Image: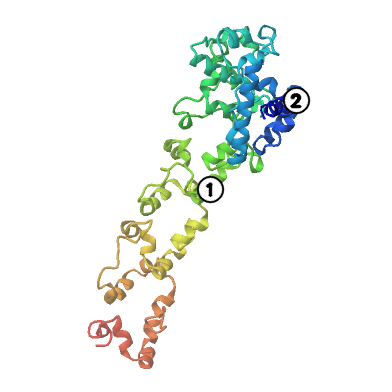
Amino acid sequence: MQKRLVWIIVIAAVILAVVTPVAIHETSKPEFCNTCHSMKPYVAAWEKSNHAESDCMACHRDPGFVGLMKVKLGGLKQVAVELTQKPEPEEIKGKGEVPNRRCESCHKLNELSGPTAITFSHELHAGKNDLECVTCHGDLVHGTPKTLKMQDCLDCHQEKKGPTKCESCHQDRATMKPQTHDAKWIAAHGTEAKKDLASCTTCHTGDLGQEKYCNACHNGVAMPHPTGWAQNHKVSDVKVCNTCHEKPVEGGKAQTCISCHKVEIPHPTTWTKDHGKFTLQNKNVDCYSCHTKTECSNCHKVEMPHPAKWLSTHGKTVLAKGTSSCYGSCHTKSTCDSCHKVPMPHSSSFKTTTHGATALTRGSTTCYTCHSKTECSSCHNNYTHASGFFAKHSSEYAKNPAKCNTCHTNKTTCNSCHSKIGHTENWLTRHGLAVGQYGSELCVTCHDRSKFCSKCHQ
């Protein structure tokens, strides 16, 4: 029995001795790693990387028997996790450690070159200062290789108390260009500068600084714009603005100007003639963002915009200054006519021919929009139709017909009350016939029978 047990142990040892190396060899291949669901994308990335000629064990195990046992025991654990938990690839990312000693088995630090145009030493960073290779090259094999930027270096130097002066790495700042400064950088740098101006000023100081470098390129305009620039940014040539603000919209206009000013900037050649109508129709446009009230008033010859009580007082201003300041720039003749209900301005014959009839037809309030009662009385011999005038108007007419005819030029005005009987020159010789036809009641409307008629009929 004991002899049989010995043979079993010997045979098992032989089988183990034969199988184990084979198993170790087979389980160390990328093909075996690729059988796990969670490892598939990492194997696919490795196949496309510049490390595709190196197998998994070159980076994921230390040399020697101890290193082999550690990685195989870790592999058994990973197989168990894969079978029981079925993790997604994202869940295992970054869990495979790759210390510097494994990288150095192939790469000699003192022989590695650094980035171009700067002073850089792999031996200083990864050797003397113990910076992990994966800090900069972590996704080199199993992901998208990281594109290092100067800010990455600055962040690390600040954290590790390393030098941050440009001269520490850059021998000649004037010829230095970060990776972002490609052919499209000039067009894009404004947007990027707004996001993080501090990153620009790490290089652009002194002779390369904002005042000498940025302002000179921007035609002397302070860059970035100082506080209050939006309120005081008048420039002599809009092309200076379009150096940066050149996002074209319809008609090739600068979007940034239109979006803020709500109007085409610079104004078109016909703007002086058209701006009045535009302003009346677009109340949201703030002209005073560029212009002053004084500037507008001096050009319009009247206060602009019109004050609150302008409608009730503008007539006097127009009579004094004429309608030229109203028409053309803002208002049209029809604008005035529609409000005044009579042609504006009045024709040259209006005063002597039709204004009386207009006043009678439309009412004197139409006139008082611009004219005062005193103004009317001064022309009409200081005479106004006071209360009770209608009862005695015949005697007033008899005294001075010309005064009445100034307004009452159409005989139908009189005839509408006097039954179309007009007092002609031979009226006295024929008025008896009219009295006989129409009756004396028509006459007493104006005449007192006892006093007026008795003068002739005693």
Residue 35 position in % (x across, y down): 70, 37
Which residue type carries mark 2? Val
The residue at the point 56 percent across, 44 percent down is: 273
Name the residue carrying label 1: 278
Q: In which quadrant of the rendered view does residue 140 lie?
A: top right
The N terminus - image quarter: top right
Establish if 3 lies above or below 449.
Answer: above
Give the farthest residue toward the left: 450
Residue 79 position in % (x across, y down): 63, 34
Q: Nearer the viewer, residue 81 or 314?
A: 81
Q: Nearer the viewer, residue 73 or 156?
A: 73
Q: Say few, some or many: other residues with alpha carbon within 10 Å of mark 1 (under 14 / 14 to 19 / 20 or more).
A: some
The residue at the point 52 percent across, 11 percent down is: 164
Q: Secondary structure at mark 1?
A: helix
Q: Nearer the viewer, residue 18 or 371?
A: 18
The residue at the point 31 percent across, 89 percent down is: 440
Establish if 398 lies above or below 26.
Answer: below
Give the farthest residue toward the front: 1
Work out whether residue 119 can be spotted.
Answer: no
Name the residue carrying label 2: 18
Residue 438 vs residue 94: left or right?
A: left
Q: Secondary structure at mark 2?
A: helix
Q: In which quadrant of the rendered view does residue 247 lie?
A: top right
Residue 457 position in % (x across, y down): 27, 87
Residue 444 position in % (x across, y down): 29, 84
Residue 438 vs residue 156: left or right?
A: left
Residue 51 vs residue 303: left or right?
A: right
The mark tally for this picture is 2
Lower position in the chain sequence, tag 2 or tag 1: 2
Q: CA distance from mark 2 to mark 1?
A: 96 Å
Q: In which quadrant of the rendered view does residue 95 lie?
A: top right
Work out whether residue 354 can be spotted.
Answer: yes
